[in-house]
Image (cartoon, grey):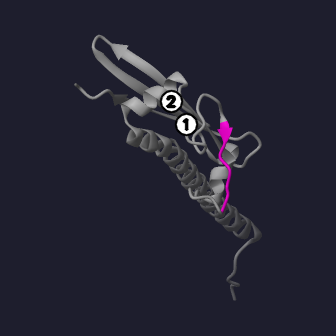
Amino acid sequence: MSKRGFTLIEIVFAMAILAVAALSMFMLNRSSNQQAMDSYYEFLAFSLAREPIEVFRGFGYDSLRMIADGNISPPAEYPTNSMHDIEFNRFSEIQYPAEASMFKRMIELKSVSHGSLRAISIKVTVAARSMSRIEVWMRNRTVSLESLILERPR
């Protein structure tokens, strides 16, 4: 009468194959999570960079030129020429996701001219605050966007 069953070597071999398959699934899940978080934080950084460009675009060239020349102050929510933390304040008129407080932003305004063409260059740089979890998740630590606001032809 022959006994049917698995030998110890067959069981160990099967367990090794299952362990490799399980480890592969865990690594795939981890990579997927990393990419999703990276995409989310990069999207948030681009949104935080686009916002002041759109606001300043609405001011028009003449108002921006006065802000760039220092004749008038920019809006308090958009300080220029220095890196500022983006604060989360649920009572503020401008609402950001809570994760936005892990970023800092610098808005630079500069007069540009080329021949008879005059414009204001707006450059916004958004970076992860040091010691924040964004430094772990986001591959690109900084995001920069630039735009030109042209003077209207007269």
Say if mark 2 contacts mark 1, CB within 8 Å.
Answer: yes
| Image height of 127 relative to 18, above or below | above
Residue 54 seen in render: yes
Where residue 67 is drawn, which disc sits there?
2
**Helix, strand, or loop for circle 2?**
helix
Residue 98: percent from the left, percent from the top? 65, 58
Q: Amino acid at mark 1?
A: Pro
| Image height of 126 relative to 154, above or below | below
Work out whether residue 149 or residue 126 is closer to the camera in this orientation and state it: 149
Name the residue carrying label 1.
74
| Image height of 3 relative to 141, above or below | below
Q: Earlier in the sequence, mark 2 or mark 1?
A: 2
Which residue is at a point 57% across and 34% down the rendered structure image? 73
Residue 47: percent from the left, percent from the top? 49, 48
Residue 26: percent from the left, percent from the top? 64, 60
Main SS category, magenta section: loop
